[in-house]
Amino acid sequence: ETGVTQSPTHLIKTRGQQVTLRCSSQSGHNTVSWYQQALGQGPQFIFQYYREEENGRGNFPPRFSGLQFPNYSSELNVNALELDDSALYLCASSLRTGVGYGYTFGSGTRLTVV
Amino acid sequence: QKEVEQNSGPLSVPEGAIASLNCTYSDRVSQSFFWYRQYSGKSPELIMSIYSNGDKEDGRFTAQLNKASQYVSLLIRDSQPSDSATYLCAVGRTGNEKLTFGTGTRLTIIP
């Protein structure tokens, strides 16, 4: 059974550019959640996808968008990058929606916007 | 008032002693409580979950929950240098898709 994998591990983008981050769910998990963790802060909920539909969203602007595919893998897209978007982006998969089961996070993608 | 509050530390504890980490939350209808450990440069790792008032023990770790006081704690017995990390408290509501995290407490175990 494979865990949650994220790619790329690190990347550097210029302000105003667009970025796509990828996440492969743990085997059998149909729910994917994305979090942003700025330096020195706790993770902040961006959104969750369940069976290819958005199933909850945090306080992030529309330039943060996502997709979930039939194999339950997921993408996070961020348009018009800002310097404050520099953070560790975490993907977590779970077997079902709701927070009663805890999350297993992937290793994260470190995004630096310059 | 922050939704989930933790003392940012750093908290220094001698090796072999008990480390006590605390967390308070503001949402009274919270029902799921988690402790994550995060090593520098790594992603958070789930180490404990608790849902009912009282204590829950797993090896050297004990989570304590008091819903009336809106308080969660984590005790680490026989602290080891490998326990040095940031510990994140997370709170969730059943039926709500998000976990709300505190800013974390940085724990250092002194050999």
Image: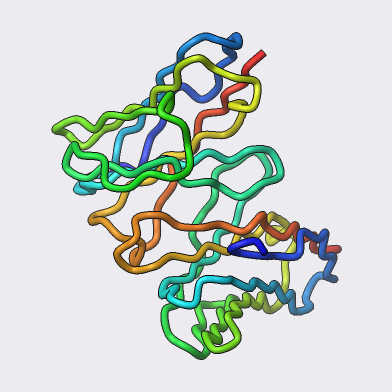
For residue A99, which quarter of the picture? bottom left
Q: Nearer the viewer, residue B97 or B106?
A: B97
Q: Nearer the viewer, residue A69 or B19?
A: A69
Q: How is the image coloured?
A: rainbow
Q: Would residue B37 appear left or right of A97 to someone viewing this image? A: right
> Which quadrant is home to the C terminus of chain B?
bottom right
Q: Nearer the viewer, residue A44 or A3?
A: A44
Q: Position of residue B46 (x, y in %)?
A: 49, 59
For residue B22, which quarter of the picture? bottom right
> Which quadrant is home to the N terminus of chain B?
bottom right
Residue at point 58%, 40% (across, down):
A37
Q: Position of residue B94 (x, y in %)?
A: 33, 68
Q: In the image as oriented, which residue stretches furthest toward the left?
A: A70
Residue at point 55%, 87% (across, down):
B66
Count of numbered badges drawn on the protein: 0
> Quick check: B16 above or below A1?
below
Q: Position of residue A28 (x, y in %)?
A: 19, 48
Residue at point 82%, 59% (across, down):
B10
> Quick check: B26 above or below B45?
below
Residue at point 51%, 9% (across, down):
A17
> Quick check: A104 above or below B58?
above
Q: Position of residue B98 (x, y in %)?
A: 41, 54
For residue B101, which quarter of the picture? bottom right
Q: Would residue A54 appear left or right of B62 to someone viewing this image? A: left
